[in-house]
Image (cartoon, grey):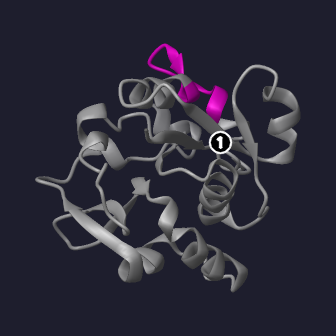
């Protein structure tokens, strides 16, 4: 069974406080992310920084970032190393991702599955990460090659998006919430 991983260990500097607990349309961004994954897996983990781990590990299944300051790739690598299972990865700040779209990513493949838009650009999150890419991902992270899109250019499998959609919109600042 695939496990879910919600990336939320960032600094949230543009938002001004932890994005996970910002309210949007009546729920926290974390609750939106959990709802989006819950129909696909009941085994959901949070990829968190050290401060979040202390605050949240009593309430949620948390994976403390083993590779701090390495961005989303460090969080994904931490999840793969800790759980040693395939991961369906979403970002906490993308509440409009929908379950049906995310489900299309789950593949029996040795490549990362992610969406590619009509301009042929990667939409790296949400994405499906088979545990078999762990060593390749670790090599990139250890060499400070931290671009998800660059990693996907080599190790990705594109799932085509029929249209450009708000599913990939990030909530980075208070103005994004309106």
Q: Position of residue 157 (x, y in %)?
A: 29, 69
Classify the position of the C terminus by image quarter: top left
Q: Nearer the viewer, residue 172 or 104?
A: 104
Is residue 112 found left or right of 84 in the rendered image? left
Q: Position of residue 83 (x, y in %)?
A: 64, 48
Badge 1 density bin: few <14, some 14–19, many ≥20, Cα 10 Å:
some
Q: Which range of residues does the magenta coloring cover?
A: 20-30
Report the residue that reaches farthest toward the bottom: 143
Q: Is residue 177 visible?
A: yes
Q: Is 27 situated above or below 84?
A: above
Q: Nearer the viewer, residue 134 or 97?
A: 134
Q: Quadrant of residue 137?
A: bottom right
Q: Is 53 situated above or below 10?
A: above
Q: Nearer the viewer, residue 3 or 98?
A: 3
Is residue 94 found left or right of 30 in the rendered image? left
Q: Position of residue 30 (x, y in %)?
A: 57, 28
56 magenta-colored = no
Classify the position of the N terminus by image quarter: top left
Residue at image x 51%, y 60%?
Answer: 131
Residue at image x 64%, y 82%?
Answer: 139
Q: Which residue is mark 1?
A: 15
């Amino acid at each position: 069974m695939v496990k879910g991983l919600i990336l939320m260990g960032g600094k949230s500097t543009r938002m001004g406080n932890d994005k996970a607990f910002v309210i949007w349309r009546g729920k926290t961004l974390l609750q939106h992310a959990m709802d989006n994954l819950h129909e696909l897996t009941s085994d959901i983990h949070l990829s968190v920084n050290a401060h979040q781990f202390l605050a949240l590990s009593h309430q949620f299944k948390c994976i403390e970032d083993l590779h701090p300051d390495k961005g989303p790739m460090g969080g994904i690598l931490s999840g793969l190393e800790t759980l040693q299972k395939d991961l369906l990865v979403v970002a906490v700040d993308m509440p409009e991702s929908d379950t049906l779209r995310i489900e299309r990513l789950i593949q029996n493949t040795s490549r990362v599955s992610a969406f590619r838009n009509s301009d042929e650009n990667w939409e790296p999150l949400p994405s499906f990460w088979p545990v078999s890419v762990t060593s390749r991902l670790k090599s990139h992270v250890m060499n400070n090659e931290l671009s998800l899109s660059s990693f996907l250019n080599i190790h990705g499998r594109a799932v085509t998006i029929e249209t450009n959609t708000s599913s990939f919109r990030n909530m980075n600042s208070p103005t994004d919430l309106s």
